[in-house]
Amino acid sequence: MLAYKRVVTVKESGSIVLTDLPLQPGQRVEVVVFADEEEQKERLRNLRALLKESQGLPQAKAISDDEIAEEVAAYRAGK
């Protein structure tokens, strides 16, 4: 199978348009879409920064491992 790469931006409607492909009318194709990883990496960096900041709060330092285990157990039990 031949592969052709195009980088496009998703339109407001949520659609993408591919033009000027070296394909014949009626030819069957398989389409695979990969999202831009840079946006995902930026969200992950922001999440890590938020977690680091929240873990540094005085309230977070006052929580014991036993209290965390109790919260996890309660959550799993549906409480």
Image: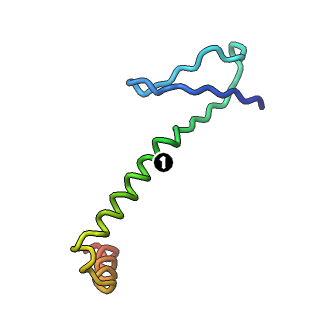
The quadrant in which residue 61 appears is bottom left
- Furthest-left residue in view? 59
Left or right: residue 25 versus residue 55 is: right
Q: Position of residue 53 (x, y in %)?
A: 31, 63
Q: Position of residue 47 (x, y in %)?
A: 38, 55
Q: Quadrant of the C terminus?
A: bottom left
At x 64%, y 14%, the residue is 20
* Secondary structure of the residue carrying numbered label 1: helix
| Viewer-nearest residue: 70 or 30 | 70
Q: Amino acid at mark 1?
A: Lys
Q: In the displayed structure, would residue 36 be above or below residue 41?
A: above
- Name the residue located 30 percent from the left edge and 82 percent from the top edge: 70
Image quarter hosting the N terminus: top right
Percent of width and height locating residue 33? 57, 35
Specify how the rendered protein is coloured. Answer: rainbow
Q: Nearer the viewer, residue 27 or 54?
A: 54
Q: Position of residue 75 (x, y in %)?
A: 30, 73
Which residue lies under the disc numbered 1? 41
Instruction: Tell me what residue is drawn at x 53 percent, y 20 percent.
Output: 17
| Rendering quarter of residue 78 | bottom left
Estimate how packed mark 1 is, as few (under 14), some (14 to 19) or many (20 or more) residues with alpha carbons within 10 Å.
few
Q: Residue furthest bottom?
A: 66
